[in-house]
Amino acid sequence: MAAREALARVLDGLRPLALEPEEKSTVELVLAEVLNNIVEHAYPDPNNPGPIHVACRHACEGLHLHVRDAGLAMPGGQAPLGLAQVVETDVDDLPEGGFGWFLIRDLAKDLSYRRVGCENHLDLRLAVALHS
């Protein structure tokens, strides 16, 4: 629930950018996937959640997001590749999971992950609310 509340606060804070509906959906989808991955994988014990910090900065080339948590490191010390999944099944039988990193990498630019001390740092840029 805290991740949902954080997502709502971030979107509320972005109102002055007057994002187009598609841009708002992009921000919401990417940030929701990132937060969901942190909750599920960085803090896998639901009885022992941890902090997640989200910072946004708008610039002429888009919205820069910096997400930081103190959870488990990403396997191999890097963000997943997020390759497209080959799905040969009915929509009702689609598996849960496995699509998030594909969506994140498809919609985000300049994605970078690093482990600093005991923290995960994820930086990415979304090409929304661009200035001419």
Image (tube, helix red, strand yellow):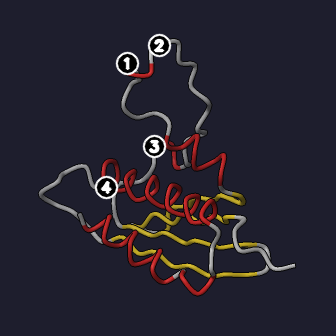
| Alpha carbon separation for disc pair 2 and 4 | 28 Å
Circle 4 crowding by C-alpha within 10 Å: few under 14, some 14–19, many from 20: many
Indicate which label's residue lies in the foreground, 4 or 1.
1
3D distance between C-alphas at marks 1 and 3: 28 Å
Q: Position of residue 98 (x, y in %)?
A: 46, 33
Amino acid, disc 4: Val
* Mark 2 and mark 3: Cα distance apart in space: 29 Å
126 vs 38, nearest the viewer: 126
**What's the CA distance linking mark 4 and mark 1?**
25 Å
Between circles 2 and 3, the one closer to the viewer is: 2
| Disc with the residue nearer the chain's start (2 vs 3) | 3
Q: How many marks?
A: 4
The three-letter code of the residue at mark 1 reads Asp
Q: Which mark is residue 75?
A: 3
Pointers 2 and 1 in contact (CB under 8 A)? yes
Q: Nearer the viewer, residue 46 or 29?
A: 29
Closer to the camera: disc 2 or disc 4?
Answer: 2
Whole-percent x and y of residue 131?
81, 79
Quadrant where the C terminus sits is: bottom right
Q: Amino acid at mark 2?
A: Thr
Counting other residues with Cα less than 10 Å from the Cα at mark 1, is it few (<14), some (14-19), or many (20 or more)?
few
* Residue identified by numbered label 4: 39
Q: Which residue is denoted by mark 2 in the rendering?
A: 89
Proximity of marks 2 and 4: CB atoms separated by less than 8 Å: no
